[in-house]
Image (cartoon, helix red, strand yellow):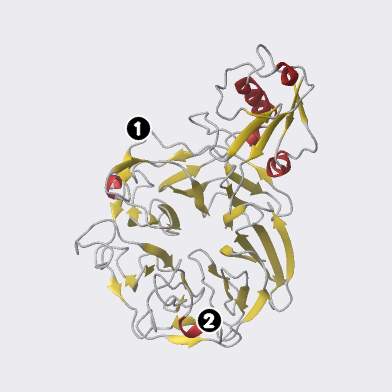
């Protein structure tokens, strides 16, 4: 079981509170987690990754275990602590600056 | 008794303002979709309970929301706007060619007869259509074939902001793009022609005969005369009496002919409204006085409408999609400002009153006249 934390705007859009708990088949990668997330919450498709290119939207970041995984390959296995559910996988909106 | 429902899109959410036909006391609901930019909301003429909203964010992209109960509840529908076929390129700021990239939906225009059919104007400019209530979207790619490689974004982006459906001919649609110009289809969107003859933009494009590249800010039409169009261009107010075949300037005695919105009185096809703005760099009313200008002669002769509007120290703007008219016997006129005020007039513009004063920056205003 993988725990996913969403930014507030996307929690409102998906009408959920708290964390999302996902079962991922096969290797626990960022791509597999995001595929499972979008399958359960179709309204999130296009808000985290581009519909066509499947790339991360520019102002979205992926964090886990105090590391920024945003620019890692989407097919790299997630840290064991995330794959086992001890640590959450964080989807966050990038800093706005200003 | 009749009532009206204003659909107000802002920089940080949507608001719904309702009143009975007197339009004196208003109920304010919102913010809906708090924190998101709501570029536009519009209800279906065929089913006023069906409303579409364009919700977007620099972080999370585009969402389309749909209501089936007049805005009480909403559900996200399809948000996949994929350009048809080879994506192609358009002119970029530096003169090179640049691939089309979807950014957001600026304007939603429900079909006049079918609540499930709705058109969407995109940035980068393209026209999309859904026939299933917004679940699935398809591009009408013939539009970009109308010299799309020569279209170039202005400072505000290359957005398709105006969609006018001809009530007498379902195959005829007018659209306008910043900063490509106006276009018309007579075959339901398969093929398009630029309709920019007569526009003069010497400070923006050197070629006086340029077919595309004009910075059209808004087009308006009265449903009883769909061949007569009114345009607020970057500079100049114009009209066409032949479906866009030729445009003639009707700025007349306006204090400045720069502005964004233009609209037509519900019952008087020659009565039109604009909000003059000082200049292309000073986006606020001349002299700090917020005045709507009305022409009852289809242009050229204009009168200021200032009663009830701030006449000192006012430096707001009124954006292109932020003006609307209702259909009540005494025509209501409404507009929203970048300062968050929404003003209404229940007497065709003779006098105005603020409906709400402190919303986020208003991006769009639409009105529904309800039985």
B289 and B66: which is toward the camera: B289
What numbered label is drawn on residue B290?
Answer: 2
The answer to whether residue B94 is left or right of residue A90 is: left
Q: CA distance from mark 2 to mark 1?
A: 46 Å
The residue located at (69%, 18%) in the rendering is A79
Element type at marker 2?
loop
Q: Chain of mark 2?
A: B
Q: Pointer 1: what residue?
A: B86
**Residue at mark 2 shares a chain with residue at mark 1:** yes
Q: Nearer the viewer, residue B364 or B248?
A: B364
Residue at screen point 64% across, 64% down: B360
The numbered mark 1 sits on a residue in which chain? B
Residue A97 against residue A94 in the figure, above or below: below
Residue B322 placement: quadrant? bottom right
Closer to us: mark 2 or mark 1?
2
Percent across and percent down for residue B283 are 46, 72
Mark 1 nearby-residue class (10 Å; few <14, some 14–19, many ≥20): few
Percent coordinates x, y for residue B60 in the rendering: 60, 42
Instruction: Kindly give the residue lying farthest to the top in the view shown.
Output: A26
Q: Is residue B29 left or right of residue B85?
A: right
In the rendered view, would you say B313 is above or below B43?
below
- State the SS at label 1: loop
Query: Which quarter shows the N terminus of chain A?
Result: top right
Residue B43 shows up from this direction? no
Give the quadrant of residue B365.
bottom right
Instruction: Give the quadrant of the C terminus of chain A.
Output: bottom right
């Amino acid at each position: 079981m993988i725990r996913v934390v969403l930014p507030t705007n996307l929690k409102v859009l998906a009408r959920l509170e708290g964390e999302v708990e996902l079962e991922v088949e096969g290797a626990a990668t960022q791509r597999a987690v995001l595929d499972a997330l979008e399958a359960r919450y179709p309204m999130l498709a296009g808000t985290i990754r581009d519909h066509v290119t499947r790339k991360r939207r520019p102002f979205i970041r992926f964090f886990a275990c105090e590391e920024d995984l945003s620019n890692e390959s989407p097919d790299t296995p997630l840290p064991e602590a995330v794959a086992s559910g001890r640590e959450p996988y964080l989807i966050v909106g990038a800093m706005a600056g200003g | 008794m009749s009532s009206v429902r204003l659909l107000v899109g802002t920089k940080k959410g949507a608001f719904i303002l309702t009143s009975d036909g007197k339009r004196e006391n208003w109920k304010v609901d919102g913010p809906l979709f708090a924190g998101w930019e709501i570029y536009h909301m519009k209800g279906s003429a065929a089913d006023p309970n069906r409303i579409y909203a364009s919700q977007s964010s620099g972080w999370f992209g585009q969402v389309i929301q749909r209501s089936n109960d007049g805005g009480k509840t909403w559900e996200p529908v399809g948000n996949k706007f994929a350009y048809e076929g080879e994506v192609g390129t358009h002119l970029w700021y530096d003169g090179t060619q640049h691939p089309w990239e979807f950014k957001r939906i600026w304007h939603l225009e429900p079909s006049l007869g079918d609540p499930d059919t709705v058109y969407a104007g995109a940035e980068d400019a393209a026209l999309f259509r859904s026939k299933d209530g917004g679940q699935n979207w398809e591009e009408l790619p013939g539009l970009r074939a109308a010299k799309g490689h020569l279209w170039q974004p202005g400072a505000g982006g290359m957005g398709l902001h105006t969609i006018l459906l001809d009530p007498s001919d379902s195959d005829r649609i007018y659209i306008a793009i910043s900063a490509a110009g106006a276009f018309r289809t007579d075959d339901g969107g398969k093929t398009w022609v630029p309709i920019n003859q007569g526009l003069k933009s010497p400070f923006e494009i050197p070629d006086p005969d340029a077919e595309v590249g004009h910075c059209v800010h808004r087009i308006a039409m009265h449903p009883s005369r769909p061949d007569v169009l009114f345009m607020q261009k970057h500079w100049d107010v114009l009209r066409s009496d032949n479906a866009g075949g030729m445009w003639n300037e009707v700025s007349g005695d306006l204090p400045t002919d720069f502005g964004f919105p233009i609209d037509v009185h519900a019952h008087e096809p020659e009565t039109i409204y604009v909000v003059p703005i000082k200049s292309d760099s000073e986006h606020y009313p001349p002299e700090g006085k917020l005045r709507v200008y009305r022409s009852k002669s289809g242009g050229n002769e204009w009168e200021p409408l200032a009663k009830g509007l701030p006449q000192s120290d006012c430096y707001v703007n009124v954006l292109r999609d932020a003006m609307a008219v209702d259909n009540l016997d005494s025509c209501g006129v409404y507009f929203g400002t970048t300062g968050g005020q929404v003003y209404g007039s229940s007497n065709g513009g003779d006098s105005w009153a603020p409906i709400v004063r402190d919303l986020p920056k208003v991006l769009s205003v639409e009105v529904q006249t309800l039985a």
